[in-house]
Amino acid sequence: MTLNDVEDHQILNEMYVHACRDLLSAYGLTVSVQERAGKATGRLTASFISILSASGGGISLSSTLKIDQALVIRLHPAESSNISLPDMADWCLELNNQLVGRVKNKLLGYGHAVDVGLPVLLTGTDVSGLAPPDSEVHRYSVESAEGYISLTLATFVAPGIGLHDMDPLMVDDVLLEGQVALF
């Protein structure tokens, strides 16, 4: 892997971490996102796991979001502890969808469009996301008084993509967060 490829992966990871902070902040949760070394650690609390991939133009990423049930309840827009299990599972999927959507919007600022798939819910014990071959994997954790989130980002960047050579502020066609395009 060349230095330029390393820089491209670093840019993707920084986008992901910033998107995570922005997402959780939008739901009133101020957190610190910390990178973790090694394999994901297991926690013995009730949790939900969502995996979501996006790819296009030589860039591929896969986001795995594992979130404690108590934090799902805290972040749910119903603001009630009487949320059904299917609604909590849907909300876990939606949180990962919003996270990857934010990364997608940031990539548009670099002139790269990716298509986002549909999130998948996993259940079981000691579940972790699978990374595609030749991908770079980074693991992150978010801890708050309300619960814990474990995040895994697997990225693949084809040689010559050159995110590191672009200034994202130079792109005028990208909508700012919250703006709507009318056709």
Image (spheres, rainbow, N blue to C red):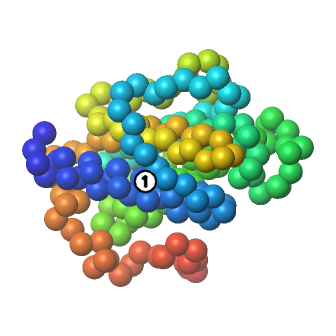
> In the drawing, does residue 179 fall left or right of residue 6?
right
Residue 134, given in percent of the width and then of the height, sits at 25, 31
Residue 135, given in percent of the width and then of the height, sits at 29, 35
**Residue identified by numbered label 1:** 17
Q: How dense is the environment of label 1, judged by Cα within 10 Å: few (below 14), some, or many (20 and up)?
A: many
Residue 72: quarter of image: top right
> In the drawing, does residue 58 fall left or right of residue 140?
left
> In the drawing, does residue 142 fall left or right of residue 113?
right
- In which quadrant is the N terminus drawn? top left
> In the drawing, does residue 83 fall left or right of residue 32?
right
Identified at 29% across, 36% down, the residue is: 136
Looking at the picture, does residue 72 appear above or below residue 124? below
Residue 51, given in percent of the width and then of the height, sits at 53, 36
Residue 14: quarter of image: bottom left
Front-lying residue, 121 or 128:
128
Number of numbered discs: 1
Q: Amino acid at mark 1?
A: Val
Identified at 65% across, 42% down, the residue is: 147
- In which quadrant is the C terminus drawn? bottom right
Q: Residue furthest right?
A: 82
Evaluate whether residue 60 shows in this view.
Answer: yes
Identified at 51% across, 58% down, the residue is: 21
Front-lying residue, 37 or 93:
37
Residue 125: quarter of image: top right
Looking at the picture, does residue 5 appear above or below residue 165? above
Identified at 71% across, 52% down, the residue is: 75
Residue 150, given in percent of the width and then of the height, sits at 52, 37
Looking at the picture, does residue 103 appear above or below residue 172? above
